[in-house]
Structures are given as C-alpha cells and as structure tokens.
Amino acid sequence: MDFTDKLTTIKNDLYAKKPSRINHIEGVAECALELKRRHFPEIPDFKILQAAYMHDFTKEYDIQAHIEILNKYNMPLDGYEEITPKLLHSKSAYAIAAYEYKLDEDVCLAVLYHTTGRENMTPLEKIIYLADYIEKNRTYVTCTDVRDTYELLVEKQHKKPMEEAILYSLDLTIGELIEKKLIIHKDTIQARNYLIKEGI
Ligand SMILES: [Fe+2]
Ligand SMILES: [Fe+2]
C-alpha cells in the first residue's frame, strides 16, 4: 500500500467510527497544512495529513480499549498515564499508526507526542502539536489566546512564531495543571525547558 492508499484507508476507517470530533480532526489537518506551508514547506503533505487524521484516532475509546491495544503491542504505561488516562489516546493511536497502518516513524511520533510535547520536537511534531491547540474549531480561551498570539507573531515577522506560540501554550497548559492540582507529564516540562534553553 502506498502513502495515498494509506491515507484513504485511515480516513475511511476514521469516518466509519463516526467520531464526534471529526470537525476538530479536519481542522487540525487544515491548520497543519497551513503551518507547514508557512514554516516547513519541505515536509510532504501526506505526512502532515496522516499525522493529523491519526492524532485523535482513539480519542473516544474507553480506558480498557486503550489498555488492550497497548498490551497487544507490549507498550507499558509510563507512570503518568495511569494517573491521567487522557494521555492514553496518544499512545494507543501511535500503536495503531505504527503497527497496523505501518506509517513512517516520524509520522507516528507526531501522533505520540501531540498531547504532551517533548524535548527537541521535530518540525512535524511541532506542527501537529500546535495545530491541535489552535485549529479554527477550538473555542477554549487558552486555545484562542495561543492562536491570536501565533498570528500576531507571524504578522510582526517574528523569527520563530511557531516555537514562541508552542512555549506560550506549554506555559498556559502547565499553569492550568498547577491550578487544578493535576500532575504534569515530564515530557511537557522537558518540552518547555528545551525551548527556553534554545533561547525562544
Ligand atoms: Fe488528542
Ligand atoms: Fe486533537
């Protein structure tokens, strides 16, 4: 199966499940393509689209369904996922992307890190992470705030508007987690520290 067939299969499988968040998923695909066009035009469209359509592939599964997928592929939980099951969908979607659709590793990793971010993210990982946060259907106040900030940075021709917007989103996410007395995944902390060290 070539990459266009794979994308068609992913989309068919996704639509067959009738996900309630399909507008969001399509919004991520559209926004990710625009981020790529502006900042990383060398990335092939199919990688952007495969990662966008896969990123929330298992979002509506219950905890048991996530655990079954992870057990099937020998993927242990990381000590955070047990406490914050919301994180499980990134990992089970990664497993399906990697082992069932056999997508390229860089695409699978963009799916895996779309929720937490991580240290030294690749351009594809940054695109999917940020598109997930700022796509047009997001109405949550922190999302619109990051979207406006990103657009303003682009307008002002800031050197690294995506990285600056990602750092801002990480700050807001971490702030919210602290406020709600929730655990912060180590990858989220490391993603932020890395950007600071990079001088963003
Ligand atoms: Fe997600
Ligand atoms: Fe999402």
Image (cartoon, grey):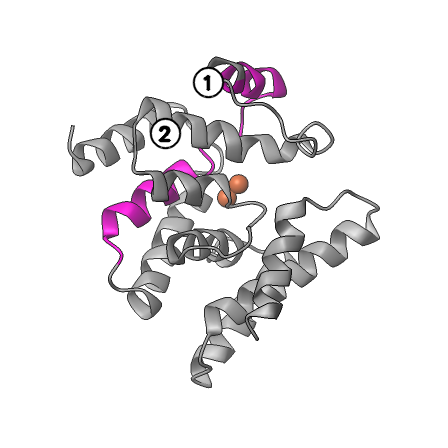
* Quarter of the figure with residue 13: top left
Left or right, 84 with reference to 24: right
* Residue 76 vs residue 36, the one in the foreground: 76
Farthest residue, direction left: 2
Residue contact between numbered discs 2 and 1, judged by CB atoms under 8 Å: yes
In this rendering, does residue 154 appear at all? yes
- For the C terminus, the image quarter is bottom right
Few, some or many residues within 10 Å of mark 1 (<14, 14–19, 20+):
few
The label on residue 33 is none
> Residue 125 placed where, x, y %?
43, 51
Q: Is residue 61 magenta?
A: yes
Few, some or many residues within 10 Å of mark 2 (<14, 14–19, 20+):
some
> Residue 11 placed where, x, y %?
30, 33
Q: Is residue 93 above or below residue 114?
A: above
* Residue 122 vs residue 166, the one in the foreground: 122
Q: Which residue is the site of mark 2?
A: 98
Q: Which residue is the site of mark 1?
A: 73
Task: Please provide the residue range marked out in magenta.
Answer: 43-70
Q: Is residue 80 magenta?
A: no
| Separation of marks 2 and 1 at Cα, in angstroms | 10 Å
SS label for mark 2: helix
> Residue 138 placed where, x, y %?
54, 54
- Residue type, numbered disc 1: Tyr
Farthest residue, direction front: 197
